[in-house]
Image (spheres, rainbow, N blue to C red):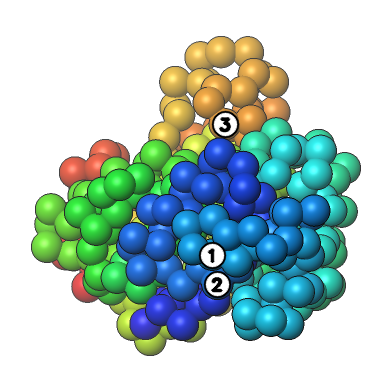
Amino acid sequence: MSILIDGDSRVVVQGITGFQGRFDTKYCLQYGTRIVAGVTPGRGGEEIEGVPVYNTVQAAVDKEGADVAVIYVPAAAVRDAVMEAAEAGVRVILATTENVPRHDAAAAVAATRRAASWLVGFNTNGMVTPGQCRLGGIGGDRTEDIYVPGRIGVCSRSGGMSAELAVTLRDAGRGVSTCVSMGGDPITGRTMDEFAGLFEADPESDAIVVFGEPGSENEQRLAAALAAGKIKKPVVALIAGEFQEQYPAGVSFGHMAAMISSPDDSASAKRRVLAEAGAHIAASLADIPRLLDEVL
């Protein structure tokens, strides 16, 4: 099974006529993703990689039945793009853009929650249900090699580490049900515990592997969900970034959200709270298969 996307997902690409939108669309189509429409205002009637372009998301929904959107627009245009997709009834929206202004990000997140849409991002390289559907640039031109079908749900705050986790699982003889790169900006559409909740409800995901890092409350929220019994499936967590504890607070490393503002934001604190809640803490990538073998 899968969460959020599968082989029946009908995808509209907002910003398909731009370089990155066109580039990723090509590889997603080759992977088998059902991209049914693109949207660029004023470019309606064109075709990109054989995909019809419309002026609005509503037209793509009405004429092509699009129910998933991938967004490639500049940061200043993200709020409007997300709201347009949500208002058109799109159920899953993936926003790849990074460094979205926080006021705009908050407004976009609020709009998608009101519309009961699932927003993935901001600053995400995508998500994939192996063998069925890929959104964004996840896996590059080697998605089939990196992400193999299986029964482990993956949620990562890092796009690059999504691939590392998937390869680790593959080499251990396991695979991925769905992998979500949830985004590295300070504000994201959904939180780690919410994605874990979807895997918890998925009968074909046996366990959940997460990658965390300093900053944000994602790991603490996941720990709270575990402690409350909302997540009962085994959770294996790899939390990187302990080195940041040697530097002054308020400095981000890598992702904008990877910033220690208080002691609770550190990798050490997140490992501790997750372990106390019942998660299994991996010391390294190589530790993940061993922990999964123990709990499954």
Which residue is under mark 2? 36
Circle 2 or circle 1, nearest the eye: 1
Tell which residue pokes out farthest to the front in this image: 45
Q: Amino acid at mark 2?
A: Val
Q: Is residue 196 left or right of residue 31?
A: right
Quarter of the image for residue 54 reads bottom right
Q: Position of residue 5 (x, y in %)?
A: 49, 73
Q: Amino acid at mark 3?
A: His
Give the camera-side residue of 15 and 230. 15
Q: Position of residue 130 (x, y in %)?
A: 32, 67
Quarter of the image for residue 238 reads top left
Q: Position of residue 66 (x, y in %)?
A: 63, 76
Q: Pointer 3: residues within 10 angstroms few (<14), some, or many (20+)?
A: some
Which residue is under mark 3? 255
Q: Is residue 128 left or right of residue 117?
A: left
Q: Pointer 2: residues within 10 angstroms few (<14), some, or many (20+)?
A: many
Tell which residue pokes out farthest to the bottom in this image: 203
Mark identifier at residue 51: 1
Q: Residue at x 63, y 13 (%)?
A: 248
Verify CB contact (< 8 Å) between mark 2 and mark 1: yes
Q: In what element is the residue under mark 1?
A: strand
CA distance for labels 2 and 3: 32 Å
Quarter of the image for residue 32 reads bottom left
Q: Is residue 289 left or right of residue 196?
A: left
